[in-house]
Amino acid sequence: MRKKNHTDDQSESLLGDEQHERVADASQDEIIADLEEKLADAEGRAIRALADFQNFQRRAANNEIEASRQGVSRVVSALLPVMDNFDLALGQDISNMSAEQLLGGVEIVRAELLRALENQGVSTIIPNQGDEFDPEIHEAVARHSDGQTEPGHIIESLQTGYKLGGRVLRPAKVVIAEAGDDDGEAG
C-alpha cells in the first residue's frame, strides 16, 4: 500500500503541476491580452497625435499664407493713392506745364510715397556729411581723403537707405573719408 500511496502522491503532484501550469498559462494569457490592449491604445494615441500635428502644420501653413496676403494687401492699399497721383500727373497736358510745375508734382508724389512707406513702418536712412560710418546701416562704395572730414566718417551720401522697424532693407550708400592723400575706390 505504501507503494500505491507513493504513486498516488506522484499523480496528485502531477495533477497539481498541470493545474499550476494552466493557471500560469491563464495568467500569462491575461497579461498578454492586457499588454496587447495597452499597445493598441498607445498606437491609437500616437496615430491621433500624428494626425493632430499634421492638421496643425496645415493650419500654420495656411495662416502664414493668409498673413502674407494680408501684409501685401495692406502695403498695396497704402500705395494706391500714390498710383492715382501718378496717373493724374501723366494725364496732364505737358504743353501747358512749366518745368517747375512738373518738378513740384513729382515732389508731391514722392512725399506721398514716403508717407505711405512710413505708415507701413519704413523709415529712411539719410546720413549727413561728417556722420560716423556705421556698417550696420551704411555701405561704403568709395573712400577718399578730403582733408576736412575725419577718417571713418561720411563725406557724401550717394543713395538713401531704408529700414523696416529695426531691420535694414537697404543700407545707405556713402563715400567715407580715409587717412592719407590718395584717392581710392573701396573694394
Image (cartoon, grey):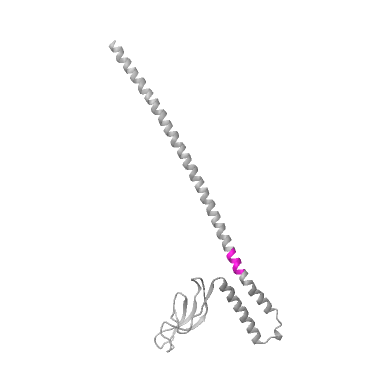
Image quadrant occupied by the N terminus: top left
**Residue 22: % across, % down:** 40, 25
Question: Does residue 62 lie above or below 50 as drawn?
Answer: below
Q: Is residue 74 magenta?
A: yes
Direction top: furthest residue: 1
Question: Does residue 184 lie above or below 87 as drawn?
Answer: below
Left or right side of 15 for 118: right
- What segment carries the magenta color? 70-76
**Residue 8: % across, % down:** 33, 15
Left or right side of 166 for 17: left
Image quadrant occupied by the C terminus: bottom left
Left or right side of 97 for 17: left
Question: Does residue 32 lie above or below 10 as drawn?
Answer: below
Q: How many marks?
A: 0
**Residue 124: % across, % down:** 52, 76
* Residue at 46% across, 42% down: 42
Q: Is residue 177 magenta?
A: no
Give residue 67's quadrant in the image: bottom right
* Residue at 58% across, 65% down: 71
Which secondary structure type mostly characterizes the magenta part of the structure? helix
Judge by depth and name the residue closer to the eye, 5 or 120.
Answer: 120
Direction left: furthest residue: 2
**Residue 99: % across, % down:** 65, 87
* Residue at 36% across, 20% down: 15
Question: Does residue 158 lie above or below 45 as drawn?
Answer: below
Give residue 83's quadrant in the image: bottom right
